[in-house]
Amino acid sequence: MLHIFVDADACPVKKEVYRVASRCQLKVTLVANARMRIPDDKSVVLKVVSDGFDAADDWIAETVQTGDIVITADIPLASRCLKAGAHVIGPTGKPFTEDNIGDTVATRDLLSQLRETGEITGGPRPLTQRDRSRFLQQLDQAIQFIRRKHPGGVAE
């Protein structure tokens, strides 16, 4: 069965994920380093991992399967999940794919170097309503694609 994994600690689109998952009758696992409120819904579970470096990322990457969906802004995690056969979507609606992950990693590394030298300051821009709409569209498209590709469901 298709499953959505959310890198939840700083995810700004959790409510959107809950809404789509409920409509499509999908299971959602939020993975975080600390407890957080989740809907009172049996299809939504919270997996709290240790607060060790990349503990949530490691748990997701080791658990995700082909045909699952991962929601994350973490580019290295996105790369690991793509290798496992998952569909990966960023909170702004950007799909991570085998075709774009290499360029995305290179851009991330370049921006990191520019921040270290002081050339760039500040973080990402705030999420807009347009980003949320794009995210919902990409999530719906990923669900429909997976369902068409695996009409009998994928391994749970």
Image (cartoon, grey):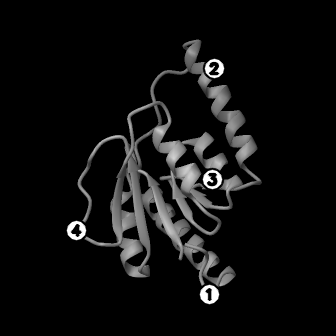
Where 76 sits versus 117, above or below? below
Mark 4 or mark 2: whose residue is earlier in sequence: 4
Give how far apart the Cα atoms at labels 3 and 1 are: 22 Å
**Amino acid tagged 1:** Gly
- Residue holding disc 4: 40
Label drawn at residue 81: 3
Mark 4 surroundings: few (<14), some (14-19) or many (≥20) residues within 10 A: few
**Amino acid tagged 4:** Asp
Label drawn at residue 152: 1
Mark 3 vs mark 2: in front? 3
Seen from the viewer's position, the closer of residues 53 and 117 is 53
Where 27 sits versus 144, above or below? above
Q: Residue at x 47, y 39 (%)?
A: 55
Where 132 sits versus 156, above or below? above
Where does the image place residue 140, in percent across and percent down from the top left?
52, 73
- Residue holding disc 2: 113
Give how far apart the Cα atoms at labels 3 and 2 are: 25 Å
Give how far apart the Cα atoms at labels 3 and 4 are: 28 Å
Q: In which quarter of the image is residue 117?
A: top right
Give how far apart the Cα atoms at labels 4 and 1 are: 28 Å
Mark 3 or mark 1: whose residue is earlier in sequence: 3
Q: Residue at x 61, y 20 (%)?
A: 114
Q: Which residue is drawn at 50% across and 47% down?
A: 59
**Amino acid tagged 2:** Gln
Q: What element carries label 4?
A: loop
Look at the numbered discs 4 and 2 and tell me whether their residues touch, using CB distance below 8 Å: no
Give how far apart the Cα atoms at labels 1 and 2 are: 46 Å
Where 106 sits versus 47, above or below? above
Seen from the viewer's position, the closer of residues 37 and 42 is 42
